[in-house]
Image (spheres, helix red, strand yellow):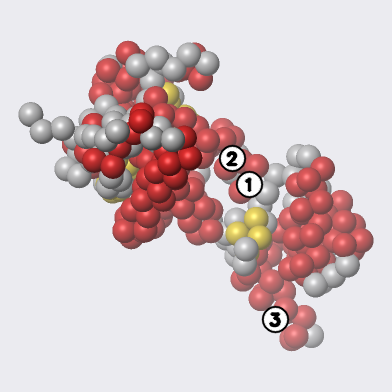
Amino acid sequence: MALNRTEQLNEGARGLDCQPPHHIAALLAKAQEAAAAVVASSSNDIAAAANLVADALERGGRLAYAAAGSSGLMALADALELPGTFGIPRDRIVVLLAGGVESLTNLTGAPEDSAERGARDVSSANLDSSDCLIAISASGSTPYAVGALQAAKSRGLKTIAMANNPGAPILEEADIGILLATPPEIIAGSTRMGAGTAQKIALNLLSTLAAIRLGHVHDGYMVNLHADNQKLRRRAVRIVAAIANCSEAEAQACLEQAGGSVKPAVLLAAGAADLAAALRLLDSNGQKLRPALSKLEGNRGSH
């Protein structure tokens, strides 16, 4: 029986344990670079998947992730940062992990063998046709991830799969399959290494593209961030000042008037009459700052 690529021995690893540490470190680093490099070839599929995610969130649905082991940790890392970075409400993000919350402190392998558990977790989360699910599995055949994906499809969800083996079953099951064809691992089967690196990069791209589509990024600024600490509050001031071309003192005053929300603060600093006017501009432009600013400038010019 042919081994999946994620289980094969990387020929460059022969004699690995006999090498000096600095040689091993260099080999591991090159393997990480090779894993990262495969992501670019899947950019079209990642972009298409991001549109599915954005569509779900735009219509009030949720984004769900389903995964086990290292893939689950990659999913969790992506999911936890979306509320703070892009202001996506926490109740719109669902993370289904084989083994549940306990797996975060005791990552055991057995729970990933249950497709029934994956399906049950989808049902327990009350996911429905307004939602979108991303199932992640390095092998592409992890029963938990496959079971969750199949259950999601049966409930009418849009589905995305991410795997590292060509021809993986999960890629065929999903509406959009993202193949990250990473080379065999330096430590055979240790998919927390290359496969996990590629998954993390691909998830970063996918969720960031979705956020851009939703209007949460303006130029290179995160204009929907949730500023809940000093660093982010200072960042919000700099963002408003940069986009509205005003002083930081004025930006701070506008943020206070807007309750800390960056987009309406930018519009206030750019000349919106008051907070209600800024919010109306955002509502009438799909919560996207660029067209709202253009409309504001147009209104000022007409007067």
Residue beneath label 3, please?
298
Q: Position of residue 171 (x, y in %)?
A: 23, 42
Compare marks 1 and 3 and give the one earlier in the sequence.
Answer: 1
Q: CA distance from mark 1 to mark 3?
A: 30 Å
Secondary element under disc 2, as helix, strand or loop, is: helix
Residue extending farthest to the left is 1
Q: CA distance from mark 1 to mark 2?
A: 6 Å
- The numbered mark at residue 85 is 1
Residue beneath label 2, please?
81
Toward which corner of the image does residue 18 lie, by quadrant?
A: top left
Q: Position of residue 96 (x, y in %)?
A: 43, 26
Q: CA distance from mark 2 to mark 3?
A: 36 Å
Q: Amino acid at mark 2?
A: Glu
Q: Position of residue 44 (x, y in %)?
A: 33, 60
Badge 2: few (under 14), some or many (20 or more) residues near its Cα, within 10 Å? some
- The numbered mark at residue 253 is none
Residue extending farthest to the bottom is 302
- Whether residues under marks 1 and 2 lie with C-beta atoms below 8 angstroms apart, the answer is yes
Secondary element under disc 3, as helix, strand or loop, is: helix
Quadrant of image for the N terminus: top left
Which residue sits at x=79%, y=60%? 238
Q: Position of residue 210 (x, y in %)?
A: 48, 53
- Whether residues under marks 2 and 3 lie with C-beta atoms below 8 angstroms apart, the answer is no
Compare marks 2 and 3 and give the one earlier in the sequence.
Answer: 2
Q: Nearer the viewer, residue 115 or 8?
A: 8
Badge 3: few (under 14), some or many (20 or more) residues near its Cα, within 10 Å? few
In the rendered view, does 259 fall on the left or right side of 221? Answer: right
Quadrant of image for the C terminus: bottom right
